[in-house]
Amino acid sequence: MWYAVRIGPVWRDGEVVSAMLIARDVSERKRLEEMKDNLIRDVSHELRTPLAKVQMSLELLMELVEAAEIDRERTGRIAGLATNNVARLLETVEGILDLSRLEAGIWSYQLEVLDLGELLYEAYGYMHSLAQVKGLDLEADFAQDLPPVEGDREKLFRVLVNLVDNAIKFTSEGSVRLGARVRDGEVEVAVADTGEGISGENVGRVFERFFQEQVGAQGAGIGLAICRAIVEGHGGRIWAESGGRDQGAVFRFTLPMVEGEGL
Amino acid sequence: VIPTLMIVEDDEELHELYTAMLEPLDYRLVRVYSGEEALGRLEEVEPNLMILDILLGTLMGDAVFRRLRQEPRWRDLPVVIVSVLAEARCRERLEMDERAVFLRKPFRKEQLLAAVQRGLTTKEEEQGGG
């Protein structure tokens, strides 16, 4: 908690008769200031780097195009680099805006009773080719009779896709497994991979916006922070488990079951 | 003799850009991806200049720079220090000497070429002057 305190004299008939202390709760203001500072920090790291690459690529492209003999291979590579970084920038900007909308409660949830199995298969189908391109096995491992859950189809689909995408990004060989089960009156979804893993002290921090395990390393960006906001918006919990570096990781989240189901 | 430049950068895309900017000139370029690799390959590569990013993975660029300055063999190696940090903050962190040239990201091609040229010239002048 943060307080701003003001102390002043209380006058009566030209004399100070007592002192007055006013304490104001400024926690919300401090929180907003911190959010602003974090946003500036994120913007400078996550947006400046790809912007710098785009700027450098375009400058080089102009030179390459103006050259007497165009080196098609190099021109193509540099153009590709600029295009990829513009796409990355757009994705980051969209992510920042989406997370802000979720945190500010501007985005409402369109709740409906969902067949979770169907949603998992959809996410599996959507991500399958991406895993294949990287030479990874994407496995689906869940019961056919999962109980229905109440949720926002589009947002939960995004959580699944983000988690699988993240697993693929940090796994260079092996597999990514998408699973679900009923546990203690909740449905628990898990995305397990055989990838880089997370060191013990950082397991709890991966859902922070733009968290990176090492300075300068490729970070998980904003995707996991969005996952957490959506899962918590559904009344669920999300967490990560890992045996440490190079031990793979499991990301789990829970969703409350529709009342009357599974009892 | 063609000068050898060791480029220490953990981002493959930036390596690609460095290569595109420097390759047309008469330099031998060696790509290195971490601070550990940079220190480990000094003897083998024998660089005439190092382009060193500050934000690297486990062993940061400033640690690499300090280690270089402690080694008699590499104490005088010209280093172009590249960072998104402001120059003043970098100078504080690094105790930059006259053989270290600062270059802030993002940079233009001319700025990179000028920094490399300046680093190499400083060294030549000293050698020339005996």
Image: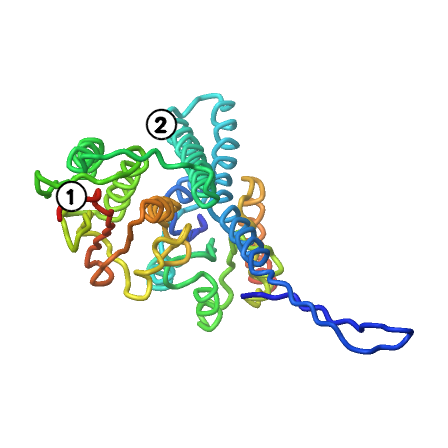
In the image as oriented, which residue stretches furthest toward the left? A144
- Asked whether residue B130 is in view, the answer is no
Left-right relation of A83 to A11: left
Give neighbour class at mark 1: few <14, some 14-19, many 20+ (Cα, 10 Å). Answer: few
In the image as oriented, which residue stretches furthest toward the front? A13
Q: Chain of mark 2?
A: A
Left-right relation of A80 to A133: right
Work out whether disc 2 and disc 1 sit on a shared chain.
yes
- Asked whether residue A227 is in view, the answer is yes
Residue indicated by mark 2 = A73
Q: Which mark is residue A261?
A: 1
The residue tagged with tag 2: helix, strand or loop?
helix
Could you tell me the amino acid type at mark 1? Glu
Give neighbour class at mark 2: few <14, some 14-19, many 20+ (Cα, 10 Å). Answer: few
Name the residue rendered at 26%, 48% in the picture.
Answer: A170
Image height of B112 relative to B76, above or below: above
Q: How far across and down, in percent of the image, does residue A214 sit? A: 37, 58
Left-right relation of A194 to A150: left
The residue tagged with tag 1: helix, strand or loop?
loop
Q: Quadrant of the C terminus of chain B?
A: bottom right
Name the residue rendered at 42%, 41% in the picture.
Answer: B19
